[in-house]
Amino acid sequence: MADGTVEKANPAEPAAAPTAWRSHGTARRSTHTLRLRVSAALVAVTVLAVLLVPPLVQLDQQAVDLAAKLEPPGWAHPFGTDDVGRDLLLRCVYGLRVSLLVGVVAALTATVIGTAVGATAGALGGWADRAVMRLVDTLASVPHLLLGVFIVAMFRPGVWPVVVSVGLTHWLSTARIVRAEVLSLRSRPHIDAAVSGGASRWRVTVRHLLPGVLPQAGLAAVLMVPHAMWHESALSFLGLGLPAHTASLGTLIQSARGSLLAGQWWPTLFPGLFLIIPTLALAGLAGVWRERISPRRRSELML
Amino acid sequence: MLELRAITAGYDRRAPAVRDASLTVAPGEAVGLLGPSGCGKSTLARVAALLHRPDAGTLLLDGTPVRRWRHRAPREKRTAFGVVFQQPRLSADPRLRLTDLIAEPLRATGRREAVPERVAELAGTVGLTPDLLTRRPHEVSDGQLQRACLARALVLRPRWLICDEMTAMLDASTTAALVAVVEDYRASTGAGLLAVGHDQTLLHRWCDRTVHWDTVTSAPTGAARPQPKRMSRP
Amino acid sequence: MTERPPVLSVRGLSVRFLLPGGRRIAAVTDAHFDVAPGECLALIGESGCGKSVLASALLGLLPANAQTAGRALLGDLDLLTADERTLARTVRGRRIGLVPQSPAAHLTPVRTIRSQLEETVAELRGVRGRAALREAAEQAAERAAFPPDHLDRHPHELSGGLAQRAATALALVGGAPLLLADEPTTGLDRDLVDRTVDELRRHVDADGDRALLMITHDLAAAERVADRVAVMYAGRIVELADAQAFFGAQGPRHPYSRGLLEALPDRAFTPIPGLPPELGDLPDGCAFAPRCERTTGACTTLPLLTGSVACHHPVPAVTSEDIRA
């Protein structure tokens, strides 16, 4: 039928053929890269500032200078000063340091608890699963903040009670995510194959189920960091978290509330920005990560 | 002797996928179970491999009834079965290199020292090159991955092989190659085979005896179940 | 049939994937073929030989790390250079109807078949008004032999065969001149395979203007439906032959195609020795040479597709058959 045309076209082609390569769909990739770079840069700046400023800059964040109180942003104080004349830029960096520390440690605690509970429930299944998940539902029905306030109230104000409070209230969602992942993995034939290959329940959980859910758990942990930071700020704002003299983003905003009404916007704006920008940057990173681990992207590279 | 007696099994007690199915495989015998897709034959295969607890009925293994399933079944009973599933992509742990995939049952049963020798031997048997063994599942084709899954099923020298639609996703040449591997293994060890599938020509050529799903179950399955096709399980 | 221009004309189509680390995967190399109106061409080969990539290239659905070369003319439109907007608005559904691999996954699970058909009819044919839409959707279902009393069901309430018909009905709505079926029979029972391909054939025969390109590894399905067969190996089309001759007494001429047919359980049931080569590391010469029993010194150079087969030592053609092909 159409063989004749093929025969004619063919002998001339191969010599000239693989020259004009065309690429497809580059635009989408570049926005991804942009988002990744901006987020990564912002997170890097935040982490570096928090780690390097306190040891390198020999200024006292607690130095009171009543003569220079509530100065607007200027050369001497780029972010202005607060109501007792402390430099706001320095206070913000120290505040971010505390908030980030609380956020990271609390998120890690929450993720470890959540992964352990979720994986156990999912791997055991049956009545154990039902019992654990009803407990999770019960805990989740109490508002986080209320539970957090309750836990903080049992201790003296300080960093660690806040970490405990945030960690103990935030593992529920991770537990749910991990359990759902484990359940979906558990019904895969490769788990059947492992069982048939003589693997013990422990080995199936540790070698086959957990590694499969770790990317999801890690993603949940990254997303948990901003969440925990906000929670810490909320507790501090309510005066229940850190003692008022310790700079944290929550205490900074709380103590500046009075001056906002008098038209002095900087003592609230800058700590607020310090809370929002790292949060968005972390969320951006988490978004890129989520796309990395999604099966659709993996299959993109396959034939 | 592998005897399934009046097995009823499924994922929902109100609508079991298998009703009252009976089937016998003698040692060294190859039985082909033929049935349309979604009829529940995969569930029966999982019951036979001690991977799914039936709601009713008995499974006799060499005359002794099996009472425990999955993890609870004694290890030597579980590992007496080599199982190969339809979709190699789903039956391989995506993180394991093919060599670890094949060696996993040896490691799980504490026979670590046998790994290098046994994996090399089986890779040769199923036709995998050393280069392929270092790759992960997403870097090989379906056919190559299914070869590795078959090698994994054979690594503990099972007395029974359960092949659930093993070749449904594969081309003719790979199909013939994998069936030849199974038959060579059976010829040298005398293992029994339950091959589940929908391809009549293939099963007739492959097995000593083929039974149709309708003769295995007493209840007319098509009418018994409200949904014509189960989507949940291959 | 030869005077009419082909529906699809593929010339020197090549696809490369760029992998991290600078590796290049030659998924499709220098494919030439035509699909004439009223014709069914079956593209066969084992998994990973590049046939699905070829389908994705025709639909403009390649991932971002792919590069293409050559031309794929659908009428006067080159599918490889057309931009996404053109492909989305004028090609997919309207000029190429896609019959998917797994209809159950292709249909939206939360909506009835009727609502999906009505939406497609409204989108592709511009039908407006409730009554008109309803009627058009029922007609579309009828054309694919989908029973009208099942229209209000959701995809999970359909059997595999009916889901396949629903997906076919959707593919046919736009009246596309080219039907592209990508492994439409994977995992189906033999009688369902037969029914599915018969229906596809019927749509090609119904009006002589339509063409079907079916991509499959199921040789029995290809034999049942195809006018011509293109065999793909390691990214290249190695044989392009008349289906009757290919499956009939004469048999295929390329050693690979012969091996593939001999592997069928109703024939010799013997596999081709060895594995297909890596698409990222193809030899300079004939890619099949390491597995071929007829290999000679000539096989270190690349065989061109001359006549119907790309091989240095093909099985000789039976003369009268060959002229007809």
Image (cartoon, coloured by chain):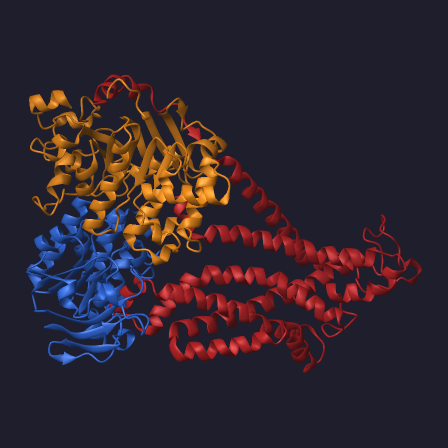
Viewer-proximal residue among A45 and B81? B81
- Image quadrant of residue C175? top left
Q: What percent of the width, then of the height, locates residue A116?
A: 47, 72
Note the chain letter of the orange one. C
Query: In the drawing, does residue C29 fall left or right of residue B170?
Result: right
Quarter of the rendering occupied by the N terminus of chain B: bottom left
- Image quadrant of residue C320? top left
Q: What percent of the width, then of the height, locates residue C221?
A: 20, 42
Single out the residue that lies furthest toward the right. Answer: A67
Point 18% across, 47% down: residue: B174
Colour of the chain lettered B: blue
Q: What percent of the width, then of the height, locates residue C284?
A: 25, 29
- Image quadrant of residue C134? top left
Q: Is residue B136 visible?
A: no
Q: Is residue B167 above or below residue A8?
A: below
Query: In the drawing, does residue C86 fall left or right of residue A31?
Result: left
Q: What percent of the width, then of the height, locates residue C251?
A: 10, 33
Q: Is residue A129 visible?
A: yes
Note the chain letter of the red one. A
